[in-house]
Amino acid sequence: MGPIRAILLPGAVLPAQAAFGGLIAALGPDVQAIAKDLELYAEDGPPADWSLDTEIDGVLREADTRGWETFHLTGYSGGGAAALAFAAKHPGRLLSLALLEPAWAGNWDWSPAYTELRKKYEQLETLPPEQFMSAFMRLGVKPNVVLPPPPDPPPPWMANRPAGIRAFLRTFKDYDLERARLAAFRQPVYFALGGLSNPHDYGDIASRLSRVFFPDFHLEVFPKRHHFDPPHRIEPERLAELLRRHWEQAEAGTVAAPVETEPLETRGG
């Protein structure tokens, strides 16, 4: 068996290396892990025609440039949504999929609580820039979570992040995540969930994906983590061990144990 090859997609805030540098170091030299920045930020502002398909094309270029016919794909938040879209359109290129609290997973089978939450995300569009980021972050965690203050001074790359997040929210409204093709995906899927994240958001997504799709689905709850202090940054050694196991099982053709199906809002503290 050759080296493990993986592409890692960040969320809409941190650059890829800042997001995944610790995780890549913990994975070790025998894992060829590429932290790929989002196409969304290739220029000063989001391209007018940007969608999840733009990110899919970027992943294909990255893999083809390296001569990778197949590889493992991991995505966090907005990058997780792009990873799901990639799995639906190019399942044959993937050995496995790892989802670190994807920001969105299609516009069907929403629970009432998730439906109400998406309305709150849509209302962010009306907020002025100085209120946008804090309101966006508050929606992603449980009510009692204390969020970190914004960096002072903010790094230069932060200036285009509100526009990038808005671009994700807009494409989520009408992007066609092909349900039938996603349901046909048979490779192993790993899902990391923070116990302090909003259960009506990422927990709801995990429940929906485990019920409707993915016969080989493994959920891992990190009880003390939430969307804005995620395990790939705060517990990189533990996540690295779990991802390596996931990737090795996928390459060996080993089927993981069935996922538990109790309500996710009762799990992880």
Image (tube, grey):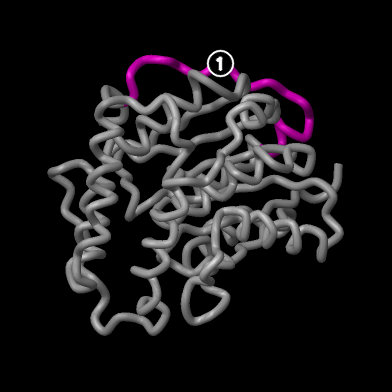
Q: Position of residue 92 (x, y in %)?
A: 79, 38
Quadrant containing the C terminus in the rendered view = top left
| Residue 260 is covered by the magenta coloring | yes
Magenta stretch mostly in which secondary structure? loop
Look at 64% across and 36% down and name the residue there. Answer: 245
Q: Amino acid at mark 1?
A: Pro
Quadrant containing the N terminus in the rendered view = top right
Q: Position of residue 140 (x, y in %)?
A: 28, 47
- Count numbered badges in the picture: 1
| Residue 109 is covered by the magenta coloring | no
Q: Position of residue 182 (x, y in %)?
A: 62, 31
Question: With 178 as the anchor, is 106 left or right in this view?
Answer: left
Look at 52% across and 20% down and name the residue there. Answer: 212
Question: With 94 as the anchor, is 97 left or right in this view?
Answer: left
| Frontmost residue, 184 versus 66 | 184
Rendered image quadrant of residue 64: bottom right
Q: Position of residue 235 (x, y in %)?
A: 43, 50
Q: Which residues are the magenta region?
A: 247-264
Look at 68% across and 25% down and name the residue there. Answer: 184
Look at 58% across and 61% down and name the residue there. Answer: 25
The answer to whether residue 165 is seen in the rendering is yes
Depicted 177 relative to depicted 183: above or below: below
- Residue under pointer 1: 258
